[in-house]
Amino acid sequence: MSRTKFRWAQSEDSILGLCAKWMRPDNDVPEKEAISSERFFPYLVIMNRGSTKKTVLVAMSGGVDSSVAAALLLEQGYNVIGVTMKTYDFDDVGGNVSNESSCCGLGAVYDARLVAARLGIPHYVMDFRKEFGRHVVDYFVAEYFKGRTPNPCVMCNRDIKWGELLKKAQALGADCIATGHYARLRYDETRNRHVVSRAAYTQKDQSYALWAISQESLSKTMFPLGMKSKPEVREIAQRLSLRTADKEESYEICFIADNDYARFLKERVDRVSVPIEEGDIVRDGKVVGKHQGYPFYTIGQRKGIGAFGRKMYVTGVDAERNTLRIGEDRDLYHSILIARNVNWVVPPGDREIRVSAMVRYKDVAEPATAYPNGEAIRIVFDRPKRAITPGQSVVLYDGEDVLGGGIIDEVME
């Protein structure tokens, strides 16, 4: 047994140890001894006995937001189950193998477990490493090697939290899942749709990353923090003496703990059969320099392209030709994009609609017209938008409500 796997299974007298052993489909547990997750549910019924409300499975990352989400639901009388997802191994993703305090590390699991103990709710660790690797990490790498800049959080939300985790929750007999996202959710009887809206606390709004979730999944979802501010959440955690009350937030992509994308991609070259080679940097059709490999660059980037006596930026990435296009800031502005793999939270039909659109997280939504076309959509902004980037998500709003979104595929003048 490897060092990492042993550390996950060593405390077998605890809930953490039991779940790490029994709910992980790997070779460390003999097939004849393995039991299904459904067999844990009788214990959950006993531990939550006395409540007449629904059972909610809360995704507990070991941070303050999900901790308070669980506390609020418990306060409202729900049967609450805490679950921490194991989505990758540090030995596999590299970069920070000695620090397992970030999301999915042992420290995060330990924090979530102690919060659950403090609240008096059961806590389990579930293994989604294979699914996360296939749906999120492999997607992330493949997109970069296509010269695009992906948003892995969108895929994680759609395929892991509201895909694999929701399936597991239903297998356990839970009625729905809840997370610590700052967003609001309601059922709109007029439209007959479950509608995601911006959080009341706009500084932390995370509705941008939720556009791809299906209606069926939204019907089994709760966002307890939708009306809370971050200071309120911390105050609640402090009042309840939760271990995570003052825990710092993590902003990097969870599986790249050192935030070194180049290092991460270089370590995966042999898995994608795409060589990373030096290539041309082009300005107005003329070669003006060399780059170190197109996957290491994104639209709007300045670092690593050389000095030209004035500020220059990456304005295009051509994976087929292994070239970068550069230009001045004004060359980053475009008015039209085509997005594909569209999901409509509120379908517009075939008609064009007026929207406010964001092209990245923390972007300022700008007025635009959306022209639906099957699984694609053309967005025309009223004014040119800076650094629209293929691979990122465009999310459409009607006021506070998310109408839908898609993956940016093409950018045009």
Image (tube, grey):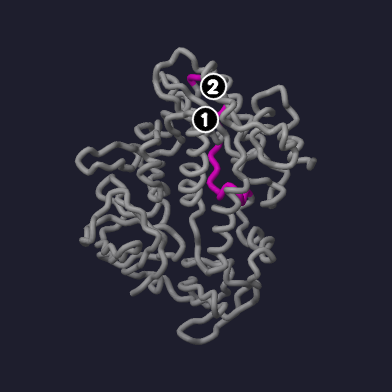
| Residue 385 on image: x %, y % | 34, 65
**Amino acid at the residue labelled 2:** Leu
Residue 312 in sight here: no
Direction from residue 307 to residue 374 in the image, left or right = left
Instruction: Specify the quadrant that holds the N terminus.
Output: top right
Residue occupying the point 36% across, 69% down: 333
Q: Tag 1: residue type?
A: Leu
Q: Does the magenta stretch include residue 254?
A: yes
The answer to whether mark 1 and mark 2 are in CB contact below 8 A is yes
Q: Quick check: 54 above or below 91?
A: above
- Residue hosting label 2: 44
Number of marks drawn: 2
Q: What stretch is highlighted in magenta?
A: 239-257
Q: What element carries label 2?
A: helix
Number of other residues with Cα within 10 Å of mark 1, as a class: few under 14, some 14 to 19, many 20 or more: many
- Is 241 positioned to the left or the right of 327 in the image? right
Dot 2, how many residues are within 10 Å of its Cα: few (below 14), some (14-19), or many (20+)?
Answer: many
Check residue 333 for magenta coloring. no
Q: Residue at x 45, y 76 (%)?
A: 327
Query: 342 or 380, which is in the foreground?
Result: 342
